[in-house]
Image (cartoon, rainbow, N blue to C red):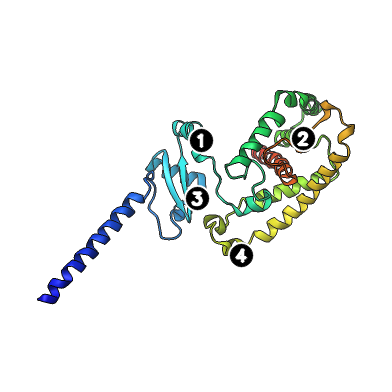
Amino acid sequence: MELSFSMFPILSTFIVLVLMILILFKQSKPKLPPGPWKLPIIGSVHHLSGSLPHHRLKDLADKHGPLMHLQLGELSLFVVSSSEIAKEVMKTHDANFADRPFYLAASIVGYDGSGMMFSPYGECWRQLRKICNLELLSSKQVQSLRAVREDEVSKFIKSISQNTGTAINLSKSLSSLVYGITAKAAFGKKCKEQDAFISLVNDGVTVGGGFSLSDLFPSSKLLAFLSSTRAELEKIHQGYDRILNDIIEEHKISENSKGEVEKDLVDVLLHVQKRGDLDIPLSNDNIKAVILVSKLMLSYCINSFSQI
């Protein structure tokens, strides 16, 4: 009887501690939007199988609402399916959603987040955005490329007019138009290995856009090391990195012989780098990453046109 009585304070203390831990755990658990049920470790991945991802996301959104939570491995994702909530995310609360998760492909092909597309939100990203807004997309720079756009559109119209009465592959013609404008805006003229460069970028988009288990578990260095696409992505990166280095060196050599109107994207970035008035110095990797983004967007446009 004495033993049972002496155990009561210990048992009651243990119960109180367990209850406190459960309450604290419940309070620390974030309030998340509704979403499909989850499995241990993989989370909601199984809900995306069996159909095209955007079809499955639509079906899930119809069931769980326009703001839905998905747990994909270690990644906690929000799926937005309405314009009103999209405005809240992209405009009202944009800073809270501005960061980027780690992706193995982006780390390898994107110069370890040196460009604006793959850079984590912070001072470096804000500086790159400022350079794009004030230097690359300024009214003066856009106006200086007017002749390039007019020349390529003129070639496009002439090509169509010369084929009057015959069937025209409009997807191919539009792809050529976008390619011509983007290439001249970025490099000023066609470099000797530009076709090889575009091919490597397309390969990077294809390989990097596939499924990778390491993307779902970014904390696992072992999965990243064992990834089946790692070696292929590194080979692609080495190929276009060599070409980009050659392009930058060619622009440095011809820098003094170019007029203000003839300056392309690479020239502008090299000028900003040489000026040296930035809080964070602009590296060659930053320049190459910005050029790469323009080509990735070109590849996306061409792939979109090819499906028209």
Helix, strand or loop status at disc 3: loop
Helix, strand or loop status at disc 2: helix
Tag 2 and tag 3, C-beta contact below 8 Å: no
Tag 3 and tag 4, C-beta contact below 8 Å: no
Query: Going from the N terminus, do you reach mark 1 or mark 4 first?
Result: 1
Q: Please, is residue 67 above or below residue 220 in the view?
A: above
Query: Going from the N terminus, do you reach mark 4 or mark 2 first?
Result: 4
Label drawn at residue 51:
3
Q: What x and y, as percent, mark residue 35?
A: 39, 47
Seen at 36% across and 50% down, the residue is 29
Quadrant of res 308: top right
Seen at 29% across and 57% down, the residue is 22
Q: Gap in Å between the C-alphas at discs 2 and 3?
A: 52 Å
Q: Nearer the viewer, mark 1 or mark 4?
A: 1
Tag 1 and tag 3, C-beta contact below 8 Å: no
Query: Going from the N terminus, do you reach mark 2 or mark 1 first?
Result: 1
Give the residue number, with chain letter if any, for mark 4. Answer: 226
Q: Nearer the viewer, mark 2 or mark 1?
A: 2
Helix, strand or loop status at disc 4: helix
Label drawn at residue 275:
2
Quadrant of res 38: bottom left
Give the residue number, with chain letter if any, for mark 1. Answer: 94
Query: Going from the N terminus, do you reach mark 2 or mark 3 first?
Result: 3
